[in-house]
């Protein structure tokens, strides 16, 4: 195949069959400037390494210069008069002096999340952050980890459509036992979860395993949007245009949206550092009165207490919790009474121990009682900020909102976590409609301002302000203003 033999490329579509889209993409290579050799073993997932071995052997024998892979559900667009997808990828390889370049590929859902992103060098069992189709238009068309603010981190590739220059030494390195240092694998582990002692399983995807291997060898890799393609599922998910429900990868937000600090050592779920930081910053020297409803082991409380201490303002910070767990199940997060009791956890002792160990006890006032009962202890219009992250059942969140909203003074803020979950979202939306309050969506949290009922809410997403607590160059301001 090919009309001009600049390079000789081995194309390997993995899997037992070819889709119509794959066939079209392969037929388009008849106009490629490169000579193309086609390999297809008809196996399953182990095709990856079978094809990779065939390519390595062929390159070392001098038969090919490059290896490319195309998955059956990844379909590059064929545009008349424009270079075919393979030529575009190889052009980027040469232009940027890369070892490997892959295409950006969205996931098969409407969130807009992609299967490309950033890895944590110290944790192979999940991404540090994935890119979304709403943020990648702000990146260069072809980018590496440093280009998006993560120099030194692994760049996680999707291997649905990619090409590697096998003339590069990086792909032919071996360890002391003679094993290739670049290959595809599905490593997994079965281990006890530190907090609960229960057995769990972790698994890493083969393309991210390959990506981390390349990163460990200091390979030069990049991701590009210059090849327009569709990831075919029950709908077609395109890797171009700005779309998707998620502005950022909120599921990993506690990795990248929270500054490093001693709270990292505390078990819990915390991705709203920017909200806490802003509340401390807006207080005068006389300070304010904050309440956190649902504190668990104290991860978010430790962050707030640290900010209060460092600000040297007269802030009062109350943490309201039974420290016995909630009434409803919460996505197997072990946050209900039944799990807490069965595991023999003393959450209150753990909370106090964490505050004491970090030297924060004097900045935190624990209030050990149910949320609604605790709210009765406070005067109406007396609080500057209330954050609700207790039981996630809809009825419980409704009760918390009804109990705490009157306690917030005009100009104050009531916010809550897990707005992406059914219970908190349904409760918050219903409350906002009932009281004619605009909701501001912040990452996975919702924010309501007392007194905003009489003002119009902006319908524009503002990315111009970056929180000091979240200085991530990809983040900007995560606020989404909406009427519900």
Image (cartoon, helix red, strand yellow):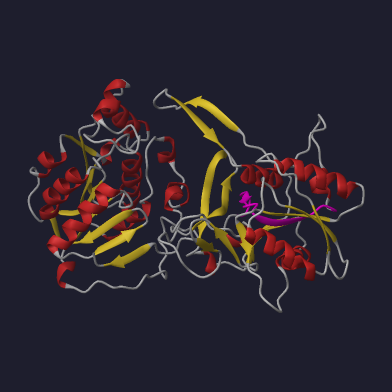
User: Residue at image x 42%, y 22%?
Assistant: 197
Q: Position of residue 405 (x, y in %)?
A: 14, 54
155 magenta-colored: yes
Q: Position of residue 346 (x, y in %)?
A: 28, 24
Q: Quadrant of the C terminus?
A: bottom left
Q: Foreground: 160 or 461?
A: 160
- Snapshot quadrant of residue 20: bottom right
Q: Is residue 103 visible?
A: no
Q: Note whether 335 is above or below 48 in the view shown.
A: above
User: Residue at image x 52%, y 47%?
Assistant: 128
User: Residue at image x 62%, y 52%?
Assistant: 158
Image position of 181 (left or right of 35)? left
Q: Note whether 169 is above or below 106 in the view shown.
A: above
The residue segment tinted magenta is 151-167
Q: Number of callouts in the render?
A: 0
Q: Position of residue 17 (x, y in %)?
A: 66, 49
1 magenta-colored: no
- Snapshot quadrant of residue 19: bottom right
Q: Note whether 423 is above or below 163 in the view shown.
A: above
User: Residue at image x 77%, y 62%?
Assistant: 97
- Snapshot quadrant of residue 82: bottom right
Q: Quadrant of the N terminus?
A: bottom right
| Residue at the right extreme, as displayed | 61
Image position of 390 (left or right of 136)? left
């Amino acid at each position: 195949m090919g009309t001009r033999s600049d390079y000789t490329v081995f194309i390997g579509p993995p899997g037992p069959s070819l889709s119509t889209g794959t066939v079209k993409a392969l037929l388009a290579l008849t106009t490629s400037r490169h000579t193309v050799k086609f390999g297809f073993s008809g196996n399953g997932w182990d095709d990856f390494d079978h094809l990779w071995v065939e390519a390595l052997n062929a390159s070392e024998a001098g038969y090919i210069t490059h290896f490319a892979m195309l998955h059956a559900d990844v379909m590059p667009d064929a545009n008349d008069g424009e270079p075919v997808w393979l030529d575009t990828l190889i052009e980027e390889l040469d232009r940027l002096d890369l070892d490997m370049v892959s295409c950006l590929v969205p996931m098969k859902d409407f969130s807009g999340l992609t299967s490309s992103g950033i890895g944590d060098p110290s944790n192979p069992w999940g991404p540090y952050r994935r890119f979304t189709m709403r943020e990648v238009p702000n990146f260069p068309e072809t980018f590496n980890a440093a280009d998006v603010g993560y120099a030194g981190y692994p760049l996680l590739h999707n291997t649905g459509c990619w090409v590697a220059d096998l003339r590069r030494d990086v792909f032919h390195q071996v360890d002391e036992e003679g094993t290739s240092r670049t290959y595809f694998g599905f490593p997994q582990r079965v281990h006890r979860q530190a907090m609960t002692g229960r057995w769990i399983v972790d698994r890493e995807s083969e393309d991210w395993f390959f990506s981390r291997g390349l990163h460990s060898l200091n390979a030069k890799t990049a991701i590009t949007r210059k090849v327009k393609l569709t990831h075919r599922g029950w709908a077609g998910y395109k890797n171009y245009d700005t779309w998707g429900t998620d502005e950022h990868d909120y599921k990993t937000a506690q990795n990248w949206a929270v500054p490093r600090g001693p709270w990292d050592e505390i078990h819990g779920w915390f991705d709203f550092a920017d909200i806490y930081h802003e509340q401390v910053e807006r207080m005068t020297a006389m300070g304010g009165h904050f309440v956190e409803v649902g504190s668990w082991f104290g991860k978010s409380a430790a962050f707030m207490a640290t900010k209060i201490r460092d600000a040297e303002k007269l802030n009062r910070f109350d943490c309201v919790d039974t420290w016995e767990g909630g009434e409803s199940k919460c996505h197997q997060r072990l946050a209900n009474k039944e799990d807490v009791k069965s595991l023999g956890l003393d959450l209150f002792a753990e909370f106090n121990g964490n505050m004491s160990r970090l030297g924060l006890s004097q900045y935190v006032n624990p209030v050990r009682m149910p949320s609604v009962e605790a709210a009765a202890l406070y005067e109406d219009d007396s609080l500057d900020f209330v954050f609700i992250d207790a039981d996630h059942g809809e009825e419980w969140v409704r009760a918390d909102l009804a109990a705490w909203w009157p306690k917030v003074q005009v100009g104050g803020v009531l916010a809550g976590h897990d707005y992406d979950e059914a219970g908190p979202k349904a409760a918050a939306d219903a409350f906002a409609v009932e009281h004619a309050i605009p909701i501001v969506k912040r990452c996975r949290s919702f924010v309501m301002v007392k007194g905003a009922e009489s003002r119009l809410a902006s319908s524009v997403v503002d990315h111009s302000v970056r929180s000091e607590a979240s200085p991530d160059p990809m983040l900007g301001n995560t606020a989404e203003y909406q009427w519900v």
